[in-house]
Every structure is written in C-alpha cells, then in structure tokens.
C-alpha cells in the first residue's frame, strides 16, 4: 500500500519544484472549473491567462498591478525568513499612503522634486511606524505579532476612513469621502510615454528586489535571520539577538508596504480615498510563500498573482463568470502549494503489507 | 444524472454561443458595478436596469461586478471602451475620476457616471432623488409609530445620505409633530453585522419604526426578529421581513438606460446631468404592507401623484435646522444647490452630526 514516509532530510529539489507543481495543478484545476461552470475550458484558459496580456497595454497593466505586490512581498519575506510573522502589511500600506498624502496635500502649491522625495520618505516611515507597534509589543511584552499586526489593519482602515471624511476631505468635493486630486509635482513620473500607467514605483520594486536579494544572501544580518528561521535555539546559542531580528523583520515589511501605499496614492490614484488598498497586503503574503521567500521568485509570483486579478476581470467581461473567480484561483494556488509542500519533508513509498 | 446535467448545460452553452455569434452586429453596452449583484441592494437595482435595457433595445450587455473604487476601475472601464462598447455605465461614486480619465482617450464612447459631479465632453451624469421616497416613508412612519421614536442606520454623512435622513423626519413630522429620529452611523456601506447591531440598539432605545441607508438587508431582518417595523432601501426587501417591511424606497434605472442608449444609437445623445425622481419614474415605493391602514395607503398614493406632478416637495419651507436656523422660508422649496450641500440635520433629529 501507499505510505507517506518522512525523508531523512528535506528535499532541496522538491522545495523549488513545489511552486511549479502548484501552479500546474492550479491551471489544470482551472480547466475543470471552467468546464463545471459550463464554459469551454480552452476558451476560458485563453480569456483568463492569455487575453489580459495579449497587447503591450495589457502587459503594462500587469506590471502596474504587480508592483505593490513585489514591494510588499520582498519586505515581508525578510521577516518571514526569521519566523517573524507580519500579517498586517495591508494596514502598513494604508498608513504609508496616509503619510504620503499628508505631504502631498501640505505642499499643494509647490513645484519641484522635493515633494515626491518627502512623500517617499513619509510613506516608508508611516509603514514602519505602524509595523513598530507589533514589534514593540512583541519585544517588550512578548505579544503575538500575528494578532497585533492583523488587528492594526482594521484600525488603519478606520483611520483612513475618518481622515477622508474629515481632515483630508476635498473642500470642493461635495462632502464625498476623498482628498483633493494631487498636483503634478506629487505624482510619480510614468516610465513609458505610451499612455500606460506604469510609474517609477516599478523601478523602486526592482530595486527593492535586488536590495532584498543582497540583504538575504550576502549580508551577515540576513544570514542571522536565516539561521533564526531554521533553528531558533542555534541562533540564540550563537548570540544572535532575537529582539533585533524582530525589529528588522517588521520594519522592513512596514517600510516596503508603506512605500507601496505611497506609490498607490501618488501613482494610479492621484489622491487618497478609503479604497487605498485593494487587498495587496494580504495577497503579498501568498506571493511571498509561492516565491519561497526568494526575491527572484517574488518577481515571478507577483506577475502570476497580478495575472489572476486581470484574468478574473476578463473572465467576467467576456464569459459572464462571477467576480469571485480570481479568489478561487488564488485559493487553489495556495491549497496546491501547501499540498505539494508536504513532499518537501515526506515522500510516498509503496510498501507491501507484511503479515505479523 | 449529474453527468447528463453537465452535458445538457454544455449543449445549451454551445447553442447560446452560436446564437450570440449570429447577432454579432448588435451594439454592446458595459456596466461597472461596485459590489456583487446579489439579490437586493444598489447594484441589484442597476442590474435590473441592465436586463430591461437588453430586453427593450436588443443591445447586448456585459458587466463586471465587485470592482474596487480604485485604480482597477480604470482598467475595467478602459477595456470596455477599447473593445468598442457604445455606452459604458459606471455605477458608483468612486469610479468618477477613472471614468473621466478614460473618457478623454475614447471620445467616441459615451460614458455615464452615477452619483458623481464631474461632467465631461462625453461623460454624462445620473443620480436619483432618493429623498422623495424617503419623505413618503417618513409619512408612513409618523403615522405608524406608537413610541414616536424612529431610527435610522446610516453609512456616511455625505449629502445624499443627509437628504434621506432629513426627508424622512420631514415626512414624519408633517403628520406627527411629536416624532423624533435617532441616527446611528456605521461607517460602512455594507457590513451586515454592524448594521444589525445598530438596528438592535435603535430598537432597544424605543424606536419602533426603523430604516437604513446602507446596502444590506440586516436592518429589515432585525426589525422582523424584534416584531417592529422597518422600511427597505434600494430594493423591495419584503421577503426578508414579511411582517416588518412596510415598504421600501426603490430605485429604477431601466428607463433611463433605455433612453440613453437609444439616444446614443440615434446620435442625439448629449452629456447632461440627470437628477431624476418620481416624475422621471426613477423612484418608486415597493408594494405597501397590509399592516398600513387603507386610509393611509390612499393618502400615500395621492401624495405620490402630487410628487410626480411636482406639487409636493419634501423640503418645502419652512425647513429649520437643529439649531433653529431657518434654511428655507415658508412658501419656497429647497434648491438643488442647497440639497447638494446638505451637511446638517433638520429639526426632529435628536442625534448630532458626526464631526
């Protein structure tokens, strides 16, 4: 009979093959899903995965959608590698967006690059401040950072809602919950001049992935965090400061999420509303795991995740499928990943039953 | 059994595909929805309009639901324009800036944005005078209440919501000067848990007729559970509270959609700002509950006729705000400008405006 047997040591090959297997299974699952929904599976596959990127504009939209995912996921990965579980990037993104918007609205009259530079700094600091709360509570009172960072998401959502209904509300906006539109000096420059929406934040994201790579694989602090992730006691025995790792892990995630928030208000939104995040902070968690917490993987996983969003929109427009189709694909991806991850530490063995 | 069902389904889909392929020449119209269509609420009413449009004009339609009011909206709207949709209806406030931006790139497409205030060269605006229905439900509430305390669960203090609250108490006080209104803000357009909690709080504070300006059916259900009365909003919500649901202020976009699309097809469409009410057939009451006495039912029907004829205005003077200041003197009606800037409660509301 078939048995699940523990491997003598974790399979290196399997840990990289697992995301590929998960993606493959998700695609196959997708074919079945389309068939069960009464759609032609091949047509569905084409509409979902090919149509959104069938022209240059589509590709640019994919990059736009993937940018915040890349930024946030690389920040989270730094913490996740050391078992620091920041689940609240969504809230850190919102606070970063708020801080950057405050700068933009304060400098409404002024021209020049200082506005954008200050917005970037404010965005990062905003995100870091929000992430500092769980870091402080964890290092001081040993609270659970998963719960604290998650709960702070809801606080951040209420905060931005209050601000756009109050102090940040556009005075000429008929009391609608939104800020004034930002001046051009507070908008991130576009990367291409073909009408696409890809902005400088994409360049930041690539830079963040490179920096993340250097930190994780070429720095001592990155090494320490890696060790702590694999073996907490070994790290402590070696004298690595757990406290410092918690701070680095959470602040890195906060800064990148805050920057992503800045990039949303200063990029495709051009103002702040209470819809500043579309769930990027949570989606980036899936991205980080599918990517094996590796910056190269994060690049591709972000593109894949962005494609699931775009494909979902197309599936609605051209096949009349419900909006939850994107979430179903995301769910399948995560489920299959967790399923195939079992085989990193286990293997299947055929064993003949021996009579006792 | 299951397999034959699936095969049948596949056959039907293939057949439909062939049929729609035959009618390729028909114009397509795109709809952008902020929430899932569901079976009651804001988006549901727009979707009824979409179905009416398909039936009456023969155009094809497609929609995207649950579109966030952020950068994603621009991509969805643009995709519709790019593939050649004749008209794109963007049905929530937060789509305003994105629709306007896309409209500048696609000048041949007609865009219509609901509930906003930015008119474009090829972007029209539409909204409904929801407050007209609110006034009538207020009259019913004023007559039906025993405690003289009414309750209102509201989302955000934007003018549209303030108009509804104030029209409701204006209506109630027109027949029952002792009526007072309590308002609870839930700071969300859709949060059934919070809406229910707010409704229960109002009911525990002696309110015996309640309503809501949020998007779920939770308030009607709460009233049903507690044996009190409620008014639905957006849609007829009577199936969620057969006893509690006195009536509802319902939205009807279909006629407007049909008219707009026919004008666009005829080449006579101009981007205008339409704010329609009873007279335009955009606001109606759901069927009146049997619990409402026949005499009152007749009076409501009569008032509906007057409102359609423009003889009854919910904010006919005197309109006095909470502080006692006269906003509209006797003999005048409130202007549209005043309505659009409404950020106060009128007399009869005992809560305070947030902020």
Image: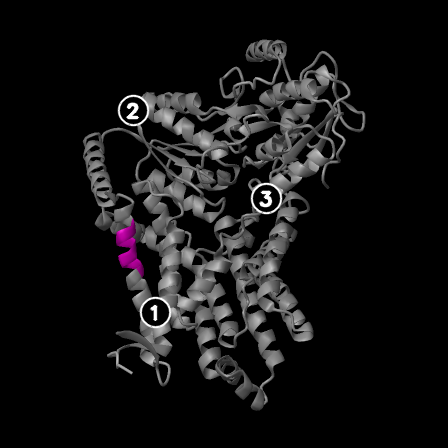
| Observer-nearest of B156 and A13 | A13
Q: CA distance from mark 3 to mark 1?
A: 37 Å
Viewer can see residue A162: yes
Find residue A340 and name its label.
1
Q: Are marks 3 and 2 in contact (CB under 8 Å)?
A: no
Name which residue lies at 56% across and 28% down: B232
Looking at the image, residue B50 lies above or below residue B281: below
Say left or right for A209 vs B166. left
Which quarter of the rendering shows the C terminus of chain A? bottom left
Looking at the image, residue A294 lies above or below residue A72: below
Dot 2: element: loop
Whole-percent x, y for residue A36 in the image: 28, 47
Q: Main secondary structure of the magenta part?
A: helix
Which quarter of the rendering shows the N terminus of chain A? bottom left
Reading the image, the residue beneath label 3 is: B193
Reading the image, the residue beneath label 2 is: B58
Say left or right for A345 vs A100. left
* 1 or 2: mark nearer the eye: 1
Extent of the magenta region: A26-33
Hey, which residue is sitting farthest front in the picture?
A: A356
Name which residue lies at 53% across and 65% down: A256
Name which residue lies at 52% across and 84% down: A224
| Observer-nearest of B352 and A28 | A28
Q: Residues within 10 Å of mark 3 (few under 14, many from 20)?
A: few
Rendering quarter of residue A345: bottom left
């Amino acid at each position: 009979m078939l048995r699940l047997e523990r491997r003598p040591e974790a399979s290196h090959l399997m840990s990289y093959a697992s995301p590929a297997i998960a993606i493959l299974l998700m695609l196959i699952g997708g074919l079945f899903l389309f068939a069960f929904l009464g759609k032609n599976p091949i047509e569905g596959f084409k509409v979902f995965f090919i149509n959104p990127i069938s022209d240059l504009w589509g590709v640019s939209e994919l990059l736009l959608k993937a940018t915040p995912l890349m930024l946030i996921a690389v920040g989270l990965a730094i913490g996740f590698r050391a078992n620091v579980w920041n689940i609240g990037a969504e809230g850190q993104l919102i606070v970063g967006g708020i801080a950057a918007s405050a700068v933009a609205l304060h400098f409404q009259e002024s021209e020049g690059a200082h506005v954008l530079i200050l917005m970037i700094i404010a965005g990062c600091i905003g995100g870091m401040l929000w992430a500092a709360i769980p870091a402080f509570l964890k290092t001081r009172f040993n609270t659970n950072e998963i719960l604290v960072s998650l709960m702070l998401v809801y606080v951040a959502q209420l905060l931005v809602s209050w601000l756009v209904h109050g102090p940040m509300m556009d005075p000429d906006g008929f009391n609608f919950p939104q800020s004034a539109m930002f001046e051009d000096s507070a908008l991130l420059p576009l990367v291409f001049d073909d009408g696409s929406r890809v902005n400088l934040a994409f360049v930041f994201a690539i830079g963040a992935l490179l920096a993340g790579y250097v930190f994780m694989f070429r720095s001592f602090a990155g090494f320490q965090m890696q060790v702590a992730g694999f073996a907490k006691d070994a790290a402590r025995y070696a004298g690595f400061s757990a406290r410092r790792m918690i701070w680095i892990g959470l602040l890195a995630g906060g800064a990148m999420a805050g920057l992503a928030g800045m990039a949303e208000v200063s990029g495709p939104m051009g103002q702040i509303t209470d819809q500043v995040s579309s769930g990027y902070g949570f989606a980036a968690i899936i991205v980080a795991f599918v990517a094996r917490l590796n910056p190269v993987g994060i690049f591709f996983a972000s593109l894949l995740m962005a494609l699931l969003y775009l494909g979902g929109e197309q599936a609605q427009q051209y096949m009349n499928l419900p909006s939850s189709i994107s979430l179903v694909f995301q769910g399948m991806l995560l489920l299959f990943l967790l399923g195939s991850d079992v085989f990193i530490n286990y293997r299947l063995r055929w064993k003949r039953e021996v009579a006792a | 059994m299951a397999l034959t069902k699936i095969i049948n389904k596949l056959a039907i889909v293939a057949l439909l595909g062939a049929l729609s392929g035959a009618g390729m020449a028909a114009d397509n119209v795109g709809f952008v929805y902020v929430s899932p269509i569901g079976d009651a609420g804001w988006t549901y009413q727009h979707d009824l309009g979409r179905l009416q449009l398909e039936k009456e004009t023969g155009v094809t339609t497609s929609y995207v639901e649950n579109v966030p009011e952020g950068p994603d909206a621009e991509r969805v709207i643009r995709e519709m324009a790019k593939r050649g949709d004749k008209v794109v209806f963007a049905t929530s406030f937060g789509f305003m800036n994105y629709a306007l931006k896309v409209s500048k790139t696609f000048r041949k497409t007609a865009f219509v944005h609901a509930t906003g205030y930015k008119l474009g060269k090829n972007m029209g605006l539409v909204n409904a005078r929801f407050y007209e229905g609110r006034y009538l439900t207020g009259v019913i509430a004023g007559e039906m209440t025993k405690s003289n305390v009414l309750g209102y669960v509201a989302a955000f203090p934007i003018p549209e919501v303030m108009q509804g609250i104030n029209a409701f108490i204006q209506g109630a006080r027109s027949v029952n000067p002792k009526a007072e209104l309590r308002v609870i803000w839930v700071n969300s357009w859709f949060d059934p848990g919070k809406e229910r909690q707010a409704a229960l709080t109002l009911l525990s504070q002696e309110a015996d007729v309640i309503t809501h300006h949020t998007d779920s059916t939770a308030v009607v259900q709460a009233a049903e559970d507690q044996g009190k009365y409620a008014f639905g909003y957006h849609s007829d919500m009577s199936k969620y509270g057969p006893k509690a649901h006195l009536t509802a202020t319902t939205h009807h976009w279909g006629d407007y959609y049909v008219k707009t699309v026919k004008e666009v097809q005829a080449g006579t469409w101009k981007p205008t700002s339409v704010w329609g009410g009873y007279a335009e057939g955009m606001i109606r009451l759901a069927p009146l509950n049997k619990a409402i006495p026949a005499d009152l039912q007749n009076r409501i029907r009569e008032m509906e006729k007057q409102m359609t004829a423009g003889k009854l205005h919910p904010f006919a003077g005197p309109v006095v705000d909470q502080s006692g200041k006269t906003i509209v003197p006797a003999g005048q009606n409130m202007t549209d400008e005043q309505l659009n800037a409404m950020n106060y409660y009128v007399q009869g509301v005992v809560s305070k405006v947030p902020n």
